[in-house]
Amino acid sequence: DFLVNAQGEDVVAGIRNTEDLNALKKKFPLIHAELLEIFARLERHYKDMCDTEFTIEQGKLWMLQTRVGKRTGAAALKMAVDMVTPTGTGRSSWKISKNEAIMRVAADHLDQVLHPQFAKKIPALTKGLAASPGAAVGQVFFTADDAASAAQKGLDVILVRSETSPEDVHGMMIAKGILTSRGGLVSHAAVVARGWGTPAIVGADAVKIDGATFSVGDVVVKEGDWLSLDGTTGEVMVGQLTLTASKPPKEFNTILEWSDVVRKGKLAVRANADTDEDARKARELGAEGIGLCRTEHMFLAADRLPVVRRMILASTPEEEHAAFEELRKVQKKDFAAILKEMSGLPVTVRLLDPPLHEFLPRVDDLEIEKATKGLSQEDEDLLRAAHEWAEVNPMLGTRGVRLGVVKPGLYAMQVRALMEAADEVSSKGYEPIVEIMIPLTVTREELALARSWVEEVLSDINSRPVPKAKKGQKVVKRPKISIGTMIETPRAALRADELAEYADFFSFGTNDLTQMTFGFSRDDVESRLMPAYLEAGLLKRNPFETIDQNGVGELVFLAAQRGRKVKRSLKLGVCGEHGGDPESIGMFYRAGLNYVSCSPYRVPIARLSAAQAVIGGAKTETK
């Protein structure tokens, strides 16, 4: 753009309509030709699109400055791919390599073409943590039940909660966007929203919820009011903003295909997926397996939760066994659907991890109902169980493998369901590849015991006849099962050599590893403490977004080295949210990990970032 009789400020300020270079050619043909030749020379030198400023004074062209130009996501992809083809002829010809093209695309560029964006934004009412990217517009509802009812009527819904729990899943599932006033980047709302690709903002502590309204300062937003959320920036805006649809250009796939060639055999990319729908989407987006299948998410469906609660409430071995059998049947169905979708690719199934109180109603809610309306006998039993299973610090309490110790039949039931599902899909011509992961082990003895539970079930399954294949299909072969553990505590990292004696693989659970290394309660620090620490320069990065390389990262390196010293073939992966962060992926490659695993919608970014880590020349230190 240019203007006659003007200064540079006039061009960028937008107070006058600018003219294009075709108009310049008509007014100053010789200068236009000279300018285009300089543009070509600059692009040839920088091998990139340039943003250049010039002025014409008394018929003479003056070049003021040049820099590599900014670009949108779609433009970045197109330029990178186009520049691999030579531009110009003869000695004036130039191009970039495919590796250079890969390095010129950033994670933000992919995000822009993967998720809806706002056509134009307005000043934000408040800001929270950007938990799941993309833009969402809808009407506000404050409970999962009200949100689900509104969605059935055809309304677009924004679910606003103080925080979410497993009981809110049916409302979260239909929401266009999710906003919470509490919680961090690995809170329930954040993790679930990222897995589904739903825009979400968490930890917006300026949002004060009161019944069917919330306020931020003097502004009050009522149920049914329109709200717009930018999950990429964390901005909350009042009103119904216009959305632009996301549609990745053809160059999106080209860049990712080039990236896959670069990282092949060096760093694989899997997805965290808990349902067959998640698995299907992950595979569509290029995942090479599932690095984390959280079995607890299968328990949260409306028809499963009552069965889980019966298992918790069981007062006799017979009642508990009956509940286990019900759960085995539904888990088998869920596992079969996932294994079918991921046929030929590895699926890492984590046995039940969260404390059991997460499957029970909140104690406070039941106590209020008891005081105001009274409770049924079933609710009285649930209240008693909620009190019994309540813990002061549940994240450090009875969860993971510890749960398997106090509920001995639980893990055996899950493994049996998984192996029966593998038999079922094998008989239909699919190829299941199963990895069983024990969560939260911290001692050799724990892992040895948990491995014995798994092997006991495997021995029983393998003693049975192999399922018959359908006519015309290959003979069914049962898959060889890998058994491994998560490394998610400092002790597990430090004693990785001992754990490696009983593990076929390690998967780093960097969410918990970060929490326990820093001593941060991850759901509490991010909304209030973390911004203060970042502003004061006490931390350079939020360690739940980008891995702390000097602390948590050192534990990853240490565990990788000690584990592989005992077992050279030990497979290493990461399944925390850091598995989708570009900078963290670079460190995981240097640590010698075999794969990273992330939310399905982060898989393209992980594929690109893994290739960039390889191109960057980082030496892998433990392979």
Image: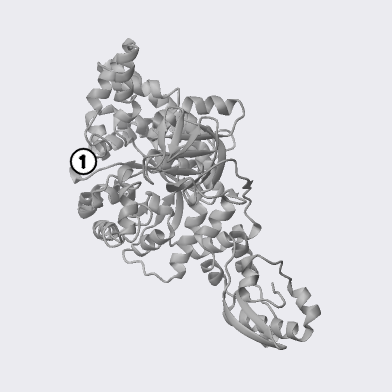
Q: Is residue 76 visible?
A: yes
Please say which color scheme the image uses.
Answer: one colour
In the image: residue 407, left or right of residue 307? left
In the image: residue 560, left or right of residue 261? left
Seen from the viewer's position, the closer of residues 459 and 500 is 500
In this view, 319 is above or below 262: above
Amino acid under disc 1:
Glu
Where residue 210 appears, as percent x and y from the top left, is 41, 30
- Helix, strand or loop at mark 1: helix
Seen from the viewer's position, the closer of residues 268 and 378 is 378
Image quadrant occupied by the N terminus: bottom right
In this view, 613 is above or below 237: below
Q: Which residue is drawn at 47% across and 43% down?
A: 200
Query: Based on the displayed image, in which of its 4 quarters is residue 564 positioned?
Result: bottom left
Q: Can residue 95 be seen in this view?
A: no
Instruction: Count all numbered tags in the image, as a single digit.
Output: 1
Q: Residues within 10 Å of mark 1 (few under 14, many from 20)?
A: some
Residue that protrudes farthest toward the right in the picture? 26
Where residue 533 appears, as percent x and y from the top left, is 30, 55
Seen from the viewer's position, the closer of residues 519 and 503 is 519
Give the residue at mark 1.
446
Where residue 512 appears, as percent x and y from the top left, is 30, 46
Seen from the viewer's position, the closer of residues 372 and 570 is 372
Q: Residue at x 67, y 81 (%)?
A: 40
